[in-house]
Amino acid sequence: MPRPHVTLKLATSLDGRIATASGESRWITGEAARAEVHRMRAGVDAVMIGAGTARADNPSLLARTEPAPARQPMRVVVTTRLEIAPEGRLFEALPGSPLVIFGAERAGPARHAILEAVGARIEQVARAGDGLDIAAVLTRLGALGVSTLLAEGGGKLAVALIAAGAVDRLEWFRAPLLLGAEGRPAVGALAMESLARAPVWRRVALAELGPDLWESYERA
């Protein structure tokens, strides 16, 4: 089963930070950039985040466009221990916009039951390092009929997708501010030993959205 085409969306400061050291991230980019992200959500089969983003931002991941989209994307959360609050905004719009939570095999049967009881679908895959086998997650999403996927972060999910060679396109919204080294990075540690081993993309579009820059890249 082919994996989905993956677009990684980043909304960062000029120095590639997605939040301050304390976790404040609303809003780094402006209204025009956020509106574009909603249009992106409306155009894909599924939107994915990691558990850290789910806890920090409490997003709904719904596409809020005018007019409203004909259908909402599947919402996907990647977490090892199923640590997702069942009263969060992710549970809005069920079952019209499905919520699929990927956890580690044999992780938290009690939490598994709680999340299923409020409408989520739980999928269990193998661990890889300190997270999940992201290739297995993508393969399962393909089997569920997902052909286009928008990944919205955070840094741990972004680096897992990049390290797996699974990011086909980058949509990077860059705000004109600096957060410094203590800010939270958009991409976690890749442990590159040399420039020759770094993954490379080519820029295919560049636009201004109010004060922000929007850069689009495709894998080289």
Image: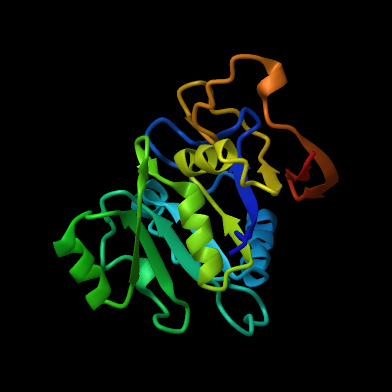
Report the colour scheme: rainbow
Q: Position of residue 122 (x, y in %)?
A: 33, 67
Q: Where 113 falls versus 106 (above or below)? A: below
**One can see residue 26 in this view:** no
Q: Where 17 falls versus 6 (above or below)? A: above
Q: Nearer the viewer, residue 181 or 186?
A: 186
Q: Position of residue 63 (x, y in %)?
A: 57, 71
Q: Which residue is the extreme one toward the front?
A: 1
Quadrant where the C terminus sits is: top right
Q: Nearer the viewer, residue 127 or 62?
A: 127
Q: Nearer the viewer, residue 206 or 82?
A: 82
Q: Give the left or right position of residue 81, taking residue 202 as reference.
A: left
**One can see residue 188 in this view:** yes
Give me the residue at 61% from left, 66% from top: 41
Q: Give the left or right position of residue 96, taking residue 116 as reference.
A: right
Q: Which residue is the extreme one toward the top?
A: 194
Q: Position of residue 85 (x, y in %)?
A: 26, 61
Give the number of callouts: 0
Q: Position of residue 44 (x, y in %)?
A: 64, 68
Res 33 → quadrant: bottom right
Q: Which residue is the extreme one toward the left?
A: 110
Quadrant where the N terminus sits is: bottom right
Give me the residue at 48% from left, 63% from top: 140
Q: Give the left or right position of residue 104, taking residue 207 as reference.
A: left
